[in-house]
Image (tube, helix red, strand yellow):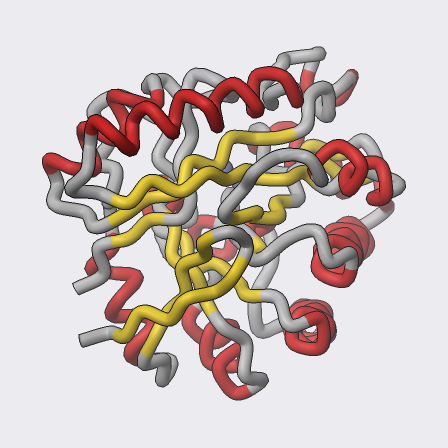
Amino acid sequence: MIRWTLHTHTVVSDGELTEEELVRGASEEGLEGLAITDHYPYPCYPVAVGGIDWATSHRALALQIKSIEYLRSRYSDITILTGAEAEFVEGLNVLERWMHDLDLDFVLGGVHLVGGWALDWSEEEFLKGITHFGSLESAFARYFEAVEELADSGIVDSIAHLDVVKKYNAGERYFSERSPWYPELVERCLRRISKANVAIEVSTAGLRKPVGSLYPSGWILKEARELGIEVTVGTDCHKMGEKVGEGLDRAEEALRSAGYERYLVFRGRKPEEVLLT
Ligand SMILES: [Zn+2]
Ligand SMILES: [Zn+2]
C-alpha cells in the first residue's frame, strides 16, 4: 500500500490548507510521509491568467521551510519533506539562481505556462492554445519541449503530471492519444527524461479533473518503465475536505500493471527507494 504523497499545496501558494492542517490530515489518514510542494517562483503567471498570484515568493518559501522544522518536532509519526513545484520559466538559469539557497528535500518540475499559454488553467484557456500556436499539435509540441528543457536543466527531481494536456480531453473530445503525432511527442519527451535521469510523477489529480484518469495514461507509464524511468507518487492535494492521500490505491494499481516494483521518495534531493509490498 502506497503511503506517501510527494505533491501537496498549502495557502502559501494556491492551496486552502495551512501546513499544519495538511500534515495533521496526512497523519490522520495514516500516511508515512509527504512533501509540501507549493508553486514556485512568484510571479510566474502574468497576463495570461489575469495576474492571479498562485505561486509563492522566495521569502515565503524560506519561511515555510522554517515552519516545517517546527512541525517535524510536533508530528513525529510522519515524515515531512520540504519541497517546491518549480515552474518552467523562460531562461531556466533564473530558476536555478532562485532555488540554490533553499533547503529543499525534493523539487518537482511542473509546466503550466508556455509562451503565454496557461494550458491547464481553464478549458477556455486550453482551447486558446489552438489559435495561439496554430494547432493543438503545435501547442503540445511546445508544451513537451518545455518539459524536456525542465528535465535537462538539472533543477528538478521529478516531472509533475506529464500529460496534463489531456486534462479537458474527456471522451477524447479534442484529440486521440492514438493519433500518430501524440505518441511521437510523448515518446521523444520520455527519451529525454530518461537520458536526464529524472523521475516522472504518477499523479492522482487527473482522477478529479474532467478527463477522470491518472496522469500519465497507462501506456505512457509502461513506456516509461521500459526506458528505465523511475517514478514518484503525488496527489496534488489543494483543498479542504480532499483526502491528502486521495487515489493512492489507483496509483499503486497503475504502477503494478506497468511493471513497477518500487517508487522513489527524496530526502535532501537524494532518491530513496520504497518497495511496493
Ligand atoms: Zn502542477
Ligand atoms: Zn501541484
Quarter location, residue 275: bottom left
Total labels drawn: 0
Give percent across and percent down for residue 148.
75, 61
Residue 37 or residue 146, whichever sits in front: 37
Is 197 placed above or below 261 here?
A: above
Please identify the quarter of the rendering in which residue 243 is found: top left
**In the depicted structure, whether residue 122 falls above or below residue 147:** above
**Residue pictured at 37% horizontal, 69% vertical:** 263
Q: Residue at x 70, y 12 (%)?
A: 50
Residue at 36% x, 80% y is 260
Q: Residue at x 62, y 28 (%)?
A: 124
Above or below residue 239? Residue 105 is below
- Seen in the image, is 12 located left or right of residue 72? right
Q: Quadrant of residue 30?
A: top left
User: Taking 75 as reference, is 85 left or right?
Assistant: right
State which quarter of the image contains the C terminus: bottom left
Quadrant location of the N terminus?
Answer: bottom left
214 or 271: nearer the eye?
271
Q: Where in the figure is residue 154, as x and y percent of width and height?
A: 73, 58
The answer to whether one can see residue 8 in this image is yes
Can you see residue 127? no
Residue 72 drawn at (x, y percent)? 29, 33
The x, y position of residue 111, in whole percent, is 66, 44
